[in-house]
Image (cartoon, helix red, strand yellow):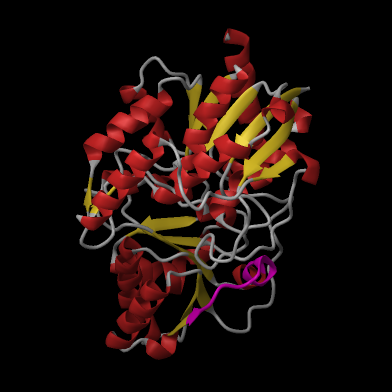
Amino acid sequence: MKKVLIISYYFPPLNSIAAKRYGTMCKYFKENGYDAYILTTVVEDGLYLGAKRDLDVPVAARKIFRIGRASSGNGFMTQMILGVGCFLQKVKISSRTISAESILWYENVKKVVDLKKFKDIDVVIGTYGPIGNIYVAKYLSKKLGCLYIADIRDLISEWREVPEGYRRCFIIDNIIEKTLLSSAGGITVVTQGFKAILKKKYPKKRISTVYNGWDGTTIEKPCNVKEKYLYYAGSLYEHRLESLSLLLQALRQVREIENIKLIVRSIGPKKLDNAAKKIAEKMGMKSSVEILPPAPEETIKEEQSRAYINIILNSIHKENKEQMITVPGKAYELMHERAPILGIVPKNSDLAALISYTNKGIGTISENEMVEFILHNCNRYKGNSNIMKFSREYQAKRLCKFMDCLLSEK
């Protein structure tokens, strides 16, 4: 049995998409020849927006090593990087690779980690984001003399989205990214679009697509739905507010024919929750939109199972190439639900292609198509056999085969 050490800052019981990637796939590693060990942080309140701490932990406690972040950094290099980070923050430049939280965690891992506990590790996986996972994975692979895989769930230096009023520092991020990935034995990504970008950038690296996915056995049977509602659960970002506005415009037309509500189960941030409420109020849709606070996993599953249509919000701008090749992790979970999916996203996006490939619904930014889907067409989309390719079990098998391949070439 080979051993894999997974560096994941977010891990169960924390309930977030980032925690679920390995928090679910780990269940299937042993049947594919790998014993999983986890290096993560201490789960604190407010660690990930409003995410709950109610996920099952798939790995024995003795194989999980939790290290909190340091309150300050001592090394000269750390102090210098933190200084640069403070400067960038002051001048409102956003970096994906210079993060005080990540660097302080990396500093503390180096300081307190017991390398003897990992002496037999065959492979180290660092999953981005946050960037601290990659810093730690590169460091430990060097110390342990073993293979390291960079798992890229979001683009690093190519990502263009920034908080309002900020600019991106592409040059610094590109330099640091290349330094971190230079020693990686392989790279895994979560979409084919990501793979195309990184393959061009790192032509000599072995790159494999390991999708996020759903977990479970069978799609739930239809239940009695007393009230029709559209349902969105997850975080809100600025680009998602735009797609929410577009959805509400369509829903305003729907309301003239049938009273169908939109329920948003948000994990924040609060600022954007309030912005969403203002958008609904301004459009005269306050009575048709309910924005609820975070809830336990079981509550969300129950609400999803009773939804008339499940909603995925993403960028509506075709020119936003990074968003067009990004597929929210929630999309895979929803394809395994009874209800069809309405993705508020252009048809040329990877998300729209996924929804079409699995026959679970449509991706569109056409108001008329949304109205038709909600009122007349949604029941045509019941899913097909392609859904099975996106189970966490199937994807875990793909990942383990990729590790086997890399180890055989070492």
Residue beneath the point at 78% across and 22% down: 1
Counting labels gives 0
Q: What residue sits 41% from the left and 43% below the top? A: 154
Q: With respect to residue 284, does 326 lie above or below?
A: above
Position of the C terminus by quadrant: top right
Say whether residue 95 is visible: no
Which residue is nearer to you in this view: 234 or 81? 81
- Using residue 286 as the reference point, say whether residue 401 is left or right of it: right
Where does the image place residue 53, in percent across and percent down from the top left? 66, 63
Q: Which residues are magenta?
A: 291-301
User: Relative to residue 345, is residue 407 drawn left or right?
Assistant: right
User: Residue 122, image x and y in percent?
Assistant: 67, 21
Quarter residue 270 falls in: bottom left
Q: Residue furthest top?
A: 409
- Residue 26 image-quadrant placement: top right
Which one is nearer the viewer's eye here, 255 or 6? 6
Residue 225 in the image: x percent, y percent?
Answer: 63, 78
Front residue (pair 192, 308): 192
**Image height check: is 123 above or below 17?**
above
Q: Is residue 29 visible?
A: yes
Answer whether residue 337 is magenta in the image. Answer: no
| Location of residue 223 in the rendering, given as x and y in whole percent from the top left corner | 69, 72
Q: Residue 292 in magenta?
A: yes
